[in-house]
């Protein structure tokens, strides 16, 4: 799996932009007397799985702006790496998140992600590789208690031939502070 020079430049530019944004946030007194930053919450999810010749690592840091007790809007970055025998894939991208809590313990969510998928099929097909964009739109429902929400979500754009997920239904645990 190789990144082309132009992809490396775009990725480095993106990382530089994100680093500058975070530095700007902290240099402007993050969390101190600024009403905007008092409503921003950080969190996301992380997962790791092991099996018989299988490894899967997922990281998705997120930031949301809590408009009030019911509505939140934000964004996330996603990274997913999986190895199944000789086959492996990497997916990375970004997304937009929206959460609605009609009551304190019930949360409806929508999450749109645009992922770049790089997949190789190992020794069985050494010349076969995939490199494509994958849109993902999750609609979910969850139970919220404090900073933790757990529930189930469904990918309405699920494509069995291209998806990096085994099924359009996916349980989740999400944490925001």
Image (cartoon, rainbow, N blue to C red):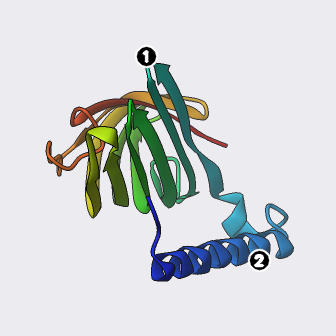
Q: Position of residue 136 (x, y in %)?
A: 28, 53
Q: Is residue 64 above or below residue 23?
A: above
Quadrant that contains the C terminus: top right
Q: Nearer the viewer, residue 8 or 14?
A: 8
Helix, strand or loop under label 1: loop
Q: Which mark is residue 70?
A: none
Q: Which mark is residue 24?
A: 2
Residue at left offset 35%, top offset 57% = 117
Q: Position of residue 158 (x, y in %)?
A: 17, 46
Q: Position of residue 52 (x, y in %)?
A: 43, 16
How far is disc 1 from disc 2 in space, using C-alphas?
Answer: 45 Å
Residue 58 appears in the picture as rendered: yes
Residue named by callout 1:
52
Answer few, some or many: residues within 10 Å of disc 2's Cα (few below 14, many 20 plus, some between 14 and 19).
Answer: few
Q: Nearer the viewer, residue 166 or 32?
A: 166
Residue at left offset 68%, top offset 75% = 21
Residue 103 appears in which quarter of the rendering?
top left
């Amino acid at each position: 799996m190789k990144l082309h020079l132009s992809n490396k430049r775009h990725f480095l530019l993106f990382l530089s932009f994100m680093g500058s944004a975070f530095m700007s946030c902290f240099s402007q007194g993050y969390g101190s007397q600024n009403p905007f930053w008092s409503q921003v919450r950080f969190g996301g999810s992380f997962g790791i799985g092991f099996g018989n010749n299988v490894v899967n690592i997922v990281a998705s840091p997120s930031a949301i702006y809590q408009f009030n007790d019911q509505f939140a809007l934000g964004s996330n970055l996603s990274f997913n790496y999986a190895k199944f025998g000789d086959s492996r894939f990497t997916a990375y991208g970004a997304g937009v998140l929206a959460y609605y809590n009609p009551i304190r313990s019930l949360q409806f969510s929508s999450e749109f992600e645009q992922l770049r998928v790089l997949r190789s099929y190992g020794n069985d097909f050494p010349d076969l590789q995939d490199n494509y964009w994958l849109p993902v739109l999750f609609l979910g429902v969850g139970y919220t208690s404090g900073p933790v929400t757990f529930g189930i979500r469904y990918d309405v754009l699920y494509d069995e031939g291209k998806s990096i997920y085994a099924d359009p239904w996916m349980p989740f645990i999400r944490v925001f502070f």
